[in-house]
Amino acid sequence: MKIMAIDFGDARTGVAISDPLELLTGYTTVIHAYTPEKAAAGVAEVAKTQGAQQLVVGLPRNMDGTEGPRAALCRDFAARLEALTGLPVDLWDERRTTVDAHRILSDNGVHGKKRKNTVDAVAASLILEGYLARRRG
């Protein structure tokens, strides 16, 4: 089954989709949208064209495990996606994924505008990797 992970953001939403065997990230992209409605429509279109069967939305938690205002926005976004696509949606703790994505890109010499345009897709890949590892374990 193809599983699609989403790193929802205010301007950019990262997307990563697994291969059908749920082993690797096979496709990544970034959706540029400034409203949750447009971001959800973009995610729904990618899910449809790529044949995703399960969605995973990153849920930002504070380091102590509590949820702040951003988590509420992501929960609302996940509900919007479920209604729009009809696909099951799971939430996944995404603590530190964006920080780790920046580190990975920096370690690989990706800086400036190129990093800004790819960091969300890398963060979505990290969300997907964690989710797939849990499913395998």
Image (cartoon, rainbow, N blue to C red):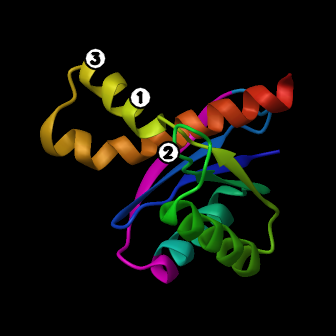
The residue that label 1 is drawn on is 100
Residue 31 position by quadrant: bottom left
Residue for point 80% across, 74% down = 86
Q: Residues within 10 Å of mark 1 (few under 14, many from 20)?
A: some
In the image, residue 117 sits, relative to residue 100, either above or below, namely: below
Chain-order first, disc 3 or disc 2: 2
Residue 51 position by quadrant: bottom right
Which residue ends up furthest to the left in the rendered image?
112
Q: Is residue 30 magenta?
A: yes
The Cα atoms of the two marked residues, 3 and 2, are separated by 19 Å
**Considering the numbered disc 3 on the image, is that residue within a helix, a strand or a loop?**
helix
Can you tell which mark lies on residue 116? none
The residue that label 3 is drawn on is 107
Residue 92: x and y, percent?
Answer: 68, 46
Q: Is residue 32 visible?
A: yes
Residue 14: x and y, percent?
Answer: 46, 52
In the image, residue 34 sits, relative to residue 109, either above or below, namely: below
Residue 127: x and y, percent?
Answer: 59, 39
The Cα atoms of the two marked residues, 2 and 1, are separated by 17 Å
Query: Mark 3 belongs to which amino acid?
Result: Asp
Residue for point 64% across, 67% down = 75
The residue that label 2 is drawn on is 28
What quarter of the picture does the C terminus occupy? top right
The Cα atoms of the two marked residues, 3 and 1, are separated by 10 Å
Task: Point out the stretch of residues depicted in magenta.
Answer: 24-38
Closer mark to the observer between disc 3 and disc 1: 1
Query: Mark 2 belongs to which amino acid?
Result: Thr
